């Protein structure tokens, strides 16, 4: 009972009039906007190096494609070549040819790239400002439970981005290169537009980065009591089917590449089940203590 009273006192002491809340919200929004502007300027200043960095998977795919001659191979051969090309800077192969067909197309592509990079770069600032705004309305144990997600979320996003950058994109681009036709005086060659290529890269990074937030989202839902581990476990077969379908849609028709996407997502789903299960066990352990406090009161 004393513990519950202390928590209620803490909440009451942190309450502020509506005007103060609005003032604080304005100040934190200003910090977020300034952080985004600074990150945008920084990313735009280095837009060309960032673009060259994002062209690297295309170069890896081009190296694998030219080293295989016809561009066709088995999944294991492609995986071996991918590991070798990723471990060392790719050399050889035909020069990459990317084009832009409008005078300001590459300029606007760099603007979009700078905006995407700014969101990723200043995400820790945005998340921290959000936490500092809602923290006064949380209990002490809720603050302690919420903080780990601020660190887990960007780490999981980087893991998903790394999977795209080092594995998925080279496979997707290799598959695109393998569709070229050359013979009998006819040559069908892939000449991707820079804007479309950068849009593909940023879209895949965003999609995979958000997909890797599955444990964070599911655990938060479990903390809120919206879902439980039993429901998640019983729906495992449907989740696996959904993951396999997603992997088949967004990856080339190669079993290895599909497995590389499906396996991490299934593993993350299992981790989510265990995270929710741990939360439920902690609640069961805390329940007798609360009952004893109520009896003592």
Image (cartoon, helix red, strand yellow):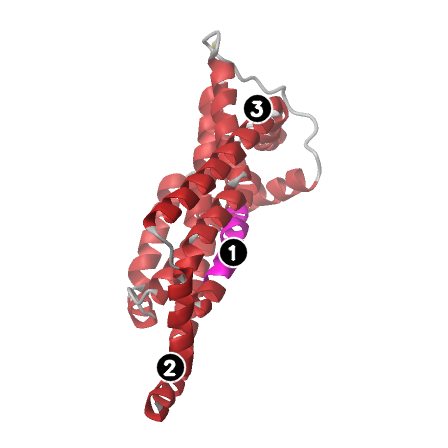
Q: From the viewer's perspective, is 202 left or right of 283?
A: right
Residues at badges 1 and 2 in contact (C-beta under 8 Å)?
A: no
Q: Secondary structure at mark 3?
A: helix
Q: Position of residue 209 (x, y in %)?
A: 46, 45
Residue nearest the viewer, comparing 171 with 264: 264
Residue nearest the viewer, comparing 151 with 47: 151
Label 2 vs label 3: CA separation?
Answer: 51 Å
Identify the residue at image location x=61%, y=32%. 60
Magenta: main secondary structure equals helix
Label 3 vs label 1: CA separation?
Answer: 28 Å
Q: Which residue is mark 2?
A: 284
Q: Tell me if residue 217 can be seen.
A: yes
Residue nearest the viewer, comparing 276 with 20: 20
Q: Position of residue 95 (x, y in %)?
A: 63, 19
Q: Position of residue 156 (x, y in %)?
A: 51, 52
Identify the residue at image location x=46%, y=10%. 101
Q: Secondary structure at mark 1?
A: helix
Q: From the viewer's perspective, is 87 left or right of 242?
A: right
Label for residue 152?
1
Identify the residue at image location x=56%, y=44%. 162
Q: Secondary structure at mark 2?
A: helix
Q: Is residue 43 above or below residue 102?
A: below
Identify the residue at image location x=37%, y=44%. 22
Label 1 vs label 2: CA separation?
Answer: 25 Å
| Among the 4 quarters of the image, the one containing residue 50 | top right
Q: Which residue is mark 3?
A: 44
* Quadrant (top left, top right, bottom left, bottom right) of the N terminus: bottom left
Q: Residue furthest top?
A: 103
Q: Is residue 50 above or below residue 219?
A: above
Pointer 2 or 3: first along the chain: 3
Q: Is 2 colored magenta in this rendering?
A: no
Residues at badges 2 and 3 in contact (C-beta under 8 Å)?
A: no
């Amino acid at each position: 009972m004393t513990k519950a009273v202390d928590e209620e006192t803490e909440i009451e002491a942190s309450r502020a009039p509506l005007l103060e809340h609005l003032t604080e919200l304005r100040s934190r929004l200003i910090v977020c906007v300034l952080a985004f502007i600074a990150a945008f300027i920084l990313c735009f200043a280095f837009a060309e190096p960032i673009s060259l960095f994002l062209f690297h998977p295309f170069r890896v795919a081009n190296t694998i494609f030219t080293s295989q001659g016809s561009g066709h191979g088995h999944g294991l051969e492609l995986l071996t070549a991918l590991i070798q090309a990723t471990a060392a800077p790719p050399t050889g192969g035909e020069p990459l040819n990317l084009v832009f067909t409008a005078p300001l197309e590459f300029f606007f592509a760099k603007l979009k790239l700078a905006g995407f990079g700014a969101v990723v770069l200043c995400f820790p600032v945005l998340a921290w400002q959000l936490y500092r705004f809602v923290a006064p309305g949380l209990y002490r144990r809720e603050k302690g439970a919420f903080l780990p997600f601020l660190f887990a979320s960007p780490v999981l996003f980087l893991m998903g981005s790394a999977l795209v950058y080092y594995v998925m994109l080279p496979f997707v681009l290799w598959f695109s290169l393998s569709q070229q036709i050359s013979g009998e005086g006819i040559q069908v060659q892939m000449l991707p537009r820079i804007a479309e290529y950068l849009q593909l890269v940023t879209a895949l990074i965003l999609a995979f980065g958000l997909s890797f937030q599955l444990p964070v989202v599911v655990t938060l839902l479990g903390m809120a009591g919206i879902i439980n581990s039993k429901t998640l476990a019983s729906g495992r077969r449907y989740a696996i089917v959904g993951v396999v379908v997603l992997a088949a849609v967004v990856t080339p028709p190669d079993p290895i590449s599909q497995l590389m996407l499906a396996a991490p997502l299934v593993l993350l789903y299992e981790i989510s089940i265990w995270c929710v299960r741990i939360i439920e066990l902690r609640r069961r352990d805390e329940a007798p203590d609360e009952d004893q406090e109520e009896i003592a009161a």
